[in-house]
Amino acid sequence: MMRIGELAQRAGTSTRSLRYYEAQGLLQARRAANGHREYDERDLRLVQEIRSLLEIGFALEETRPFVECLRAGNKAGDVCPASIEVYRKKLAELDAGISRLNEIRDRLAAQLEAVAERKRPCSH
């Protein structure tokens, strides 16, 4: 068993984040007789899963299916249908964002080209 500080240190996060994950129902601490939070290696794995998903742009709530998948005893958080669906949804969001950014880029490039055309000296 480990206390919250050790879990935070091993997971590369803060105790504040761990308390927040707990408040959101993603992490469930057990309490020692003295009231201190206690965690085990499974909790470390959950936090690592949450952190890795957050690092690649997932919202905290989007990590829930992955956490639940791990809690169900799976070796990976992305083998359950709900997790796979979150992957699909995130990929569709990214594709839409990329498409929108490409449209903006094309408009900006066209605008820049128009400015350059207006600035060219006349050749008589």
Image (cartoon, rainbow, N blue to C red):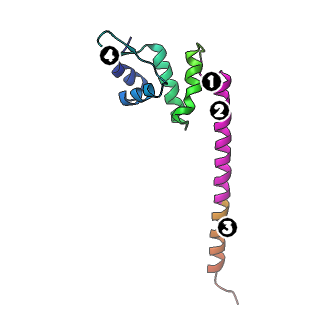
Q: Are marks 2 and 4 in contact (CB under 8 Å)?
A: no
Instruction: Tell me if mark 4 has few (under 14), some (14-19) or many (20+) residues whose alpha carbon lies within 10 angstroms of its own.
Output: few
**Picture residue at 59% right of the left edge, 25% below the top:** 65
Q: Which residue is mark 3?
A: 110
Query: Which corner quadrant holds the C terminus?
Result: bottom right
**Closer mark to the observer between disc 3 and disc 4:** 4
Q: CA distance from mark 4 to mark 1?
A: 31 Å
Q: Which residue is mark 1?
A: 78
Say if the magenta span includes residue 79: yes
Which circle's residue, 3 or 1, is located before the other in the chain? 1
Residue 55: percent from left, percent from top: 51, 35
For the magenta stretch, what is the residue range?
A: 76-105
Q: Which residue is mark 2?
A: 87
Residue 68: percent from left, percent from top: 57, 21
Q: Are marks 2 and 3 in contact (CB under 8 Å)?
A: no
Q: CA distance from mark 2 to mark 4?
A: 36 Å
SS at mark 2?
Answer: helix
Q: CA distance from mark 2 to mark 3?
A: 34 Å
Up-down relation of residue 1 to residue 86 (above or below): above
Q: Which residue is mark 4?
A: 36
Query: Which corner quadrant holds the N terminus?
Result: top left
**Closer mark to the observer between disc 4 and disc 1:** 4
Q: Is residue 99 rendered to the left or right of residue 9?
A: right
Prevailing secondary structure of the magenta residues? helix
SS at mark 3?
Answer: helix
Q: CA distance from mark 3 to mark 1?
A: 42 Å
**Closer mark to the observer between disc 3 and disc 1:** 1
Amino acid at the residue labelled 1: Asp
Q: CA distance from mark 1 to mark 2?
A: 8 Å
